[in-house]
Image: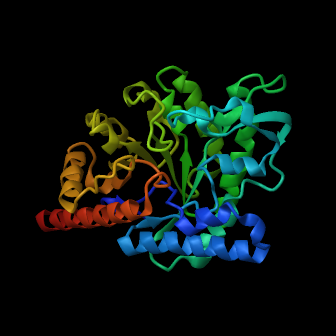
Amino acid sequence: MQPKPIRTTVVGSYPFPGWLEFATQHLDQFGPADVEEMIDDAVVAAVHDQTTAGLDVITDGEQTRLDFNLSFYGFIKGLQPNHSETRKFGPAAHDQRGKHSIVDELTAPKGLGAVNEYQRLKKLAPAGPTLKASVPGPYTLSGRMLPNERYKDRYAITEALLPFVRQELEDLVAAGCTEITVDEPSMSCYAYREDTRRFVDIFNRTVAPVVGKCRLSTHLCFGNFKGRPVGYRSIKPMLPDFLDLTVDEVHIEMANREFAEIELLAEFAQVVDVAVGIIDVKNYYIETVADVQERIQRCLQYVPAEKLAVAPDCGLSQTARWAARQKLINMVAGAKKVREQLAVTA
């Protein structure tokens, strides 16, 4: 089924409720049943905020993940946290995110956990919105693992992880998931210095088994750790190679970059649908409904309405919940107004 024009969506993550952050620091005081109840309640809260805003596509807010990809490391055998390699003090940056040493063969005997997340979402979400699962791609997933003699560089680690991600995607589809985002921000961050054809090959091999079996998208951004980017913030190095990604939709960070290179959206729109980040998750300015309308109109100069979706730039986990909630409300209201205007002029 063709998605509605100017569909409203999200990347995946949503802020944790304050009580959940507090509880995770005192897990020794809770039993397994208490923890399950907390997880359900956190997902209910994330779903409530998204459905109240009126989003067409929602997620579970990744409420069981402490980090959009590091939490998956708990499902991968052969890893050991390496705290000696991370910087402890000074300004927040990506070198303060957790690193892991590889101490044995990498395996994922019980999958990566995304299927259980989706099943919980399906149980708790109301009828209406499309339910989406987000999974990091193998190149991004490899980013905090340190090479060793067995896995000599990041690409070797990526190849070891690729079957795990591919199986998770197949299992999600088997569980009834109809929309999946494969997050590969490391590919967009490092397109300026790495072999982009190699990136495309890795991505397409990862998703091959589920192509045509779900609505498949990928998220391309320049990093967001505590509101800080990490990569060279330009779309140009991704082109033309990233046009060969086997996806139905690409999600591109725009608002934080003041819509620089917006004209390049037209190249993506020739081959895929485009979800444009029109909400800045790194900024505590709350975009007004009028802001959203103006930004969508700019996007429509390069992407037809039937191929356009709008979303925040990245996941919202690094944005305070009060801001995330209002940003989504205004985004949906602005999209609805533009949709109504287009219907009148059609």
**Residue 35, quarter of picture:** bottom right
Is residue 311 found left or right of 260 in the rendered image? Answer: right
Q: Residue at the location (65% across, 66% down)?
A: 23
Q: Is residue 246 above or below residue 48?
A: above
Q: Give the side of residue 57 with respect to residue 138, left or right.
A: left
Q: Image quadrant for the N terminus?
A: bottom left
Q: Residue furthest front?
A: 89
Q: Quadrant of the C terminus?
A: bottom left
Q: Position of residue 66 (x, y in %)?
A: 63, 54
- Residue at 44% in and 43% down: 227
Nearest to the observer: residue 208 or residue 224: 224
Q: Does any portion of residue 322 appear in the rendered image?
A: yes
Q: Position of residue 180 (x, y in %)?
A: 55, 56
Task: Report the residue at 59% width, 75% height from top.
Answer: 41
Which residue of the protein is positioned furthest toward the left in this rendering? 345
Residue at 17 percent across and 59 percent down: it is 290
- Does residue 3 appear anywhere in the picture? no
